[in-house]
Image (spheres, rainbow, N blue to C red):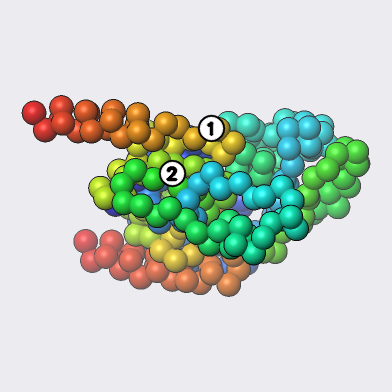
């Protein structure tokens, strides 16, 4: 079972208690009425959804109920970083490099 | 068994037959209590503490008990406040008075949930039939309270002593939760 650390409960819980709510750090436009349809559609629907290291919003729905952000490798399902809502997005490339290094060391 | 519990709020309901009564584990329905759902930010938390009689806990997954009241941490801005069944009016009015100047949400949810008391040396075994978290005493200390899932039903779990737990589920989910545990307990009878 995949265990996920909740930054608010400060403990690891099974994945069952969580839901993933898509890409993180998508800011709602300050003035929606100034947006063109294309801009608005992009904000609503278009996500990067790439393979690999990805910053996502997760919600501890069957626990404290809070949203938080997590950086996850969508290939291996490994969580590289978990941080509270409002904290800045970590440098994904640096995280990926560190992760690759530590998993290479583990293989030795 | 009852003496070492962190709270005296959950008394077995005298009018009810035990749901389960085995040498190693028992399940009892509890008498009604007053439950208040309280949500608010730091300022509201402080004000609510004054109205409730003691400060609400800020440590994650922790409960504070005093006299015949308890405040349970459910989230960083969410608490469940417990009091005696007949103390609803007084608790509510003193909280509302203390919180009159502060934005908050305070709702009486006394009848939303039912509670059962699961007690005995096999209590953790029985709960782990449906709960996927580690209930070993080192991982889940006495006094720890959390919301989690029991198979498909959301529950609240509070460890009130080393071998007793309060399980709260919404009224319509309680038969599901207790039914599965009663069924699983057949295995203990066979052993």
Q: Quadrant of residue A70?
A: top left
User: Horizontally, is A2 left or right of B167 in the view?
Assistant: left
Is residue A25 among what the camera can see?
yes
| Residue at x-position 60% and y-position 43% | B75
User: Horizontally, is B133 left or right of B166 in the view?
Assistant: left
| Residue at x-position 50% and y-position 59% | A46
Badge 1: residue crowd in 10 Å (few <14, some 14–19, many ≥20):
few
Tag 2 subunit: A
| Labels 2 and 1 in the same subunit | yes
Tag 1 subunit: A
Q: Position of residue B87 (x, y in %)?
A: 80, 50
Q: Secondary structure at mark 2?
A: strand
Please tell me which residue lies in front, A44 or A58: A44
User: Horizontally, is B112 left or right of B86 in the view?
Assistant: left
Q: Total label count? A: 2
Is residue B144 among what the camera can see?
no
Please tell me which residue lies in front, A100 or A77: A100
Q: Position of residue B90 (x, y in %)?
A: 86, 47
Reply above or below: B113 against B144: below
Mark 2 or 1 closer to N-term?
A: 2
Q: Which mark is residue A88?
A: 1
Reply above or below: B105 against B5: below
Reply above or below: B109 against A80: below
| Residue at x-position 78% and y-position 50% | B106
Reply above or below: A60 against A36: above
Please tell me which residue lies in front, B76 or A53: A53
User: Horizontally, is A29 left or right of A22 in the view?
Assistant: right
| Residue at x-position 81% and y-position 53% | B88
Per the image, the residue denoted by label 2 is A55
| Mark 2 vs mark 1, CA separation in Å | 11 Å
Q: Position of residue B97 (x, y in %)?
A: 91, 41
């Amino acid at each position: 079972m995949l265990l996920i650390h909740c930054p608010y409960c400060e403990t690891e819980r099974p994945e069952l208690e969580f839901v993933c709510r898509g890409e993180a750090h998508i800011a709602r436009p300050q003035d929606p009425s100034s947006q063109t349809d294309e801009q608005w559609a992009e904000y609503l629907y278009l996500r990067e959804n790439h393979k690999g290291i990805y910053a996502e919003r997760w919600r501890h729905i069957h626990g404290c109920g809070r949203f938080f952000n997590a950086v996850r490798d969508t290939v291996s399902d490994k969580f590289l970083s978990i941080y509270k809502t409002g904290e800045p997005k970590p440098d994904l490339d640096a995280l990926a490099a560190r992760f690759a290094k530590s998993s290479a060391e583990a293989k030795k | 068994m009852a003496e070492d519990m962190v709270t005296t709020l959950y008394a077995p309901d005298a009018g009810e037959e035990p749901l389960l009564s085995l040498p190693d584990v028992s399940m009892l329905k509890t008498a009604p209590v007053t439950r208040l759902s309280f949500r608010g930010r730091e300022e509201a938390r402080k004000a609510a503490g004054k109205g409730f009689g003691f400060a609400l806990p800020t440590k994650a997954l922790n409960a504070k008990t005093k006299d015949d009241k308890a405040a349970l941490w459910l989230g960083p801005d969410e608490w469940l406040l417990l009091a005696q069944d007949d103390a609803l009016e007084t608790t509510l009015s003193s909280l509302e008075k203390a919180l009159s100047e502060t934005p908050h949400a305070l709702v009486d949810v006394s009848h939303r949930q039912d509670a059962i008391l699961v007690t005995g040396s096999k209590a953790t075994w029985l709960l782990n039939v449906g709960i996927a978290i580690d209930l070993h005493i080192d991982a889940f200390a006495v006094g720890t309270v959390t919301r989690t899932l029991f198979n498909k039903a959301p529950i609240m779990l509070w460890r009130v002593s080393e071998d007793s737990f309060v399980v709260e589920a919404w009224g319509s989910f309680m038969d599901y939760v207790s039914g599965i545990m009663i069924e699983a307990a057949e295995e203990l009878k066979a052993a």
